[in-house]
Image (tube, rainbow, N blue to C red):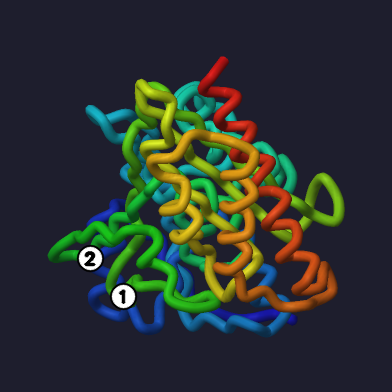
């Protein structure tokens, strides 16, 4: 299906924000367009006006600012895959990037676009939730930071206002004595929407107790989500198989999956249990050397 729309090409970030302030309700920002083109062809989305923000340099930075890591909303998955900083300090996001679609898509797809698409199976949302990320939403007159777990409202619905652009994502530099990782379960190894995806962040204190834990789940609810009860259960405890079993069961309770062509709801719940235990073992083993 062919869709006709007007195209805007702002020269600067401020130009883009001014355009959104003027007519944001009718403008669809696009960087890589890897989701938008498919949605237009299927008839799910028929934008009146598309605004190309792919070439705005203000959105393409990857850097560490003190105790925070920050990336622009226009950073591509390929840039994440090639970043030594991501591989060293944000392994969960790096692992998600190298499994994202295929090399051609990774060259175009952006972190901001993937988050704003707000799919329950978003490959970048899950590791970023586990890393404790927040997003910067910028309008022509102001900017605000929103915790990523508050950004997703419903299936393909976010907290972004029509006059705002997702300009950056940031998260704390993982502390010493911590590890983070990501796992994607799909029907094949590449070009697959996840059946279940999961990311875990664990930090141990000097006594070997879990002082911080974050567990993020994808494809098991209307939005990407954190398994808060499982995280609370882990804190202050000594890592053990019995503890991992409890956490896996608690994470299952956070899920509200559906049955579809990729898997049944029951299978997804079971895999959450299995993968939570597996990734907790993996992260604790990494910390222990």
Pointer 1 or 2: first along the chain: 2
Quadrant into which the C terminus falls: top right
The number of callouts visible is 2
Residue 187 located left or right of residue 164: right
Of all residues, the one furthest to the top in this rendering is: 289
> Quick one: label 1, few (<14), some, or many (20+) residues within 10 Å?
some
Secondary structure found at label 1: loop
Residue drawn 61% across the image and 42% down it: 182
User: How many residues crowd around disc 2 within 10 Å: few (fewer than 14), some, or many (20 or more)?
Assistant: many
- Res 54 visible: no
Figure check: 96 above or below 22: above
Q: Is residue 68 above or below residue 120?
A: above
Can residue 108 be spotted in the picture?
yes
| Helix, strand or loop status at disc 2 | loop
User: Residue 256 location, x and y as percent?
Assistant: 62, 75
Image-based side of 147 in relation to 46, left or right:
left
Point 64% across, 39% down: residue: 241
Nearer the observer, 168 or 248: 248
Q: Disc 1 vs disc 2: Cβ atoms closer than 8 Å?
A: yes
For the residue pair 117 and 273, the one nearer the viewer reads as 273
Q: Quadrant of residue 193?
A: bottom right
Location of residue 219 (image quadrant): bottom right
The residue drawn where x is 69% and y is 41% is 278
Foreground mark, 1 or 2, reads: 1
Residue 285 coordinates in the image, percent (x, y): 60, 25
Quarter the N terminus occupies: bottom right
On residue 161, the disc is: 1
Name the residue tied to disc 2: 139
Task: Identify which residue is drawn at 84% across, 74% down.
Answer: 261
Label 1, label 2: how many angstroms apart (C-alpha)?
Answer: 9 Å
């Amino acid at each position: 299906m062919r869709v006709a729309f007007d195209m805007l090409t702002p020269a600067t970030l401020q130009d883009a924000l001014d355009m959104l302030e003027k007519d944001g309700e009718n403008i669809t920002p696009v960087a890589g367009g890897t989701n938008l083109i498919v949605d237009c062809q299927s008839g799910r989305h028929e934008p009146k006006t598309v605004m190309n923000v792919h070439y705005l340099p203000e959105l393409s930075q990857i850097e560490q600012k003190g105790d925070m890591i920050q990336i622009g909303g226009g950073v591509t998955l390929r840039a994440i895959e090639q970043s030594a900083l991501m591989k060293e300090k944000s392994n969960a996001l790096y692992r998600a990037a190298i499994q994202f679609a295929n090399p051609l898509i990774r060259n175009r797809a952006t972190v901001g676009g993937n988050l704003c698409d707000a799919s329950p199976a978003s490959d970048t949302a899950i590791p970023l939730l586990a890393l404790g990320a927040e997003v910067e939403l910028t309008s022509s007159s102001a900017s605000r930071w929103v915790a990523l777990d508050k950004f997703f409202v419903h299936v393909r619905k976010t907290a972004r206002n029509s006059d705002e652009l997702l300009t950056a994502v940031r998260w704390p530099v993982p502390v010493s004595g911590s590890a983070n990782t990501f796992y994607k379960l799909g029907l094949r190894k590449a070009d697959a929407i996840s059946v279940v995806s999961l990311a875990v962040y664990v930090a141990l204190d000097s006594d070997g107790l879990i002082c911080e834990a974050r567990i993020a789940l994808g494809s098991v609810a209307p939005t990407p989500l954190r398994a808060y009860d499982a995280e609370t259960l882990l804190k202050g405890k000594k890592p053990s198989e019995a503890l991992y079993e409890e956490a896996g069961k608690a994470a299952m309770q956070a899920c509200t999956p559906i049955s579809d062509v990729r898997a049944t709801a029951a299978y997804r719940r079971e895999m959450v249990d299995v993968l939570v235990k597996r990734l907790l073992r993996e992260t604790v083993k990494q910390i222990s050397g």
